[in-house]
Amino acid sequence: LAKKTRQTSIVFEARLEQRSANRLELIAQLRKAITDNEFCLFFQPKLNLRTNSINQAEVLLRWNHPVHGLIAPGAFIELAEQTGMIRDITRLVLKQTYAIITLCANQNIRLSVNLSAMDLEDFSLIDFMQTLHKQQPDASRHIVLEITESAAMRDPEQALDILNQLAAMHFQIAVDDFGTGYSSLAYLKRFPVTELKIDRSLVQGADLDTDGQIILESTIEMGHIMGLLVTTEGVETQSEYELVKKLGADYVQGFWLSKPMPFDEFKLKHLVGNHD
Ligand code: C2E
Ligand code: CA
Ligand code: CA
Ligand code: CA
């Protein structure tokens, strides 16, 4: 199924880029997808290298398109951001994540949700999250919000304001895709961040390349010096896994461990019997 999904999404993406008329068509379809909630969530496990256990996962969005089947976010997230539809999508993802946390009451589980740049400029998102938070005050402790540096740096003061309000509700904040784009450590230090997710471009092949290994090692060290938990993303091979473990990463995520999967599968494989 995973292979088929990926192919469908790649074909769909290529077609979208070829015909500009498709952009309008896609906008209409995406609008309908939001109204009818054609989205579902996939979960990619994270391995805790300290305890050698799995109780965390990243929430990854899929569009269950009526014609094309499951589509990965690469095919529509950018358009959702350009059109502002991402605001509604983020709310759907958060709502579904809250529902999952409710299902997992008393379980030791933590889910990471991706926020987009626009979410860090959206003060009404805070109201939305306050409402969820009031209904379920304990849920936020089970949720990590992933932001990228470039998103936070579009308007750092505003992002800081929003992130401080989210941290006050006990959400944890992770910096995603670290090592891509520009890094402003001065600002990063001011943000209420608890986790650094090192991008797969720094991880992949680092086992075969001395310079790459030095860069990865110093990035992990820097995260630790700043008091952050460090996740290495995109670990695909046993040898990459052994390297990041040796270099002291706290968590590992990647196809070496597991591809993203539907919640029922994640639950069966990793959550059964895993109580607080
Ligand atoms: P990301 O946040 O960096 O998420 C990790 C992506 O890398 C996922 O792709 C995941 O399937 C893929 N991946 C994980 N392990 C490996 C590996 O070992 N090798 C390789 N080559 N890839 C790996 P996915 O699910 O297609 O998502 C792509 C991007 O779309 C995400 O990148 C994130 O930026 C965005 N995204 C996903 N879900 C959401 C969402 O709910 N909201 C928003 N705003 N963005 C989302
Ligand atoms: Ca992410
Ligand atoms: Ca990432
Ligand atoms: Ca990303």
Image: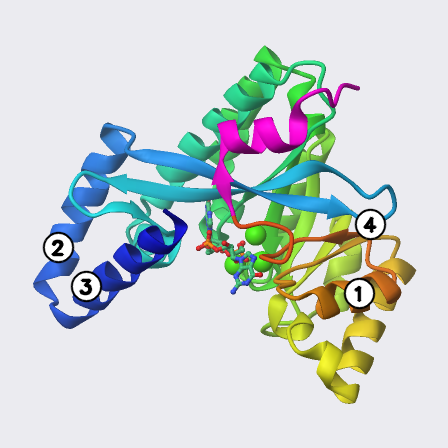
Evaluate whether residue 171 shows in this view: yes
In the image, is residue 239 part of the stretch drawn in magenta? no
Dot 1 lies on which element?
helix
Residue 192 in view, yes or no = no
Q: Residue at x 82, y 65 (%)?
A: 220
Q: CA distance from mark 1 to mark 2?
A: 47 Å
Of circles 1 and 3, the one toward us is 1
Which residue is disc 3 drawn over? 16
The relative height of residue 129 versus residue 60 in the rendered view (above or below) is above
Q: Which residue type does callout 2 highlight? A: Leu
Any mark on residue 242, and which?
A: 1
Disc 4 crowd rating (10 Å Cα; few below 14, some 14-19, many 20+) is: some
Q: Earlier in the sequence, mark 3 or mark 4?
A: 3
Could you give the CA–CA distance between mark 1 and mark 3, rounded to whole angstroms? 40 Å
Mark 2 vs 3, N-terminal side: 3
Q: Can you identify the residue that label 4 sits on?
A: 49
Which of the two marks, 3 or 4, is nearer to us in this view?
A: 4
Query: Disc 3 and disc 4: Cα gap in Å?
Result: 40 Å
Please check the rendered image and state whether residue 263 is part of the magenta-colored stretch, yes or no: yes
Q: CA distance from mark 2 to mark 3?
A: 10 Å
Secondary structure state at the residue bearing disc 3: helix
Q: Badge 2 local density, few (<14 within 10 Å), some, or many (20+)?
A: few
**Which residue is more in the foreground, 20 or 190?**
20
The region drawn magenta spans: 260-276
Instruction: Give the CA separation, mark 1 to mark 4.
Output: 11 Å
CA neighbours of label 1 inside 10 A, class few (<14), some (14 to 19), many (20+)? few
Side of 269 where 243 appears, left or right: right
Residue mark closest to the camera, 1 vs 4 = 1
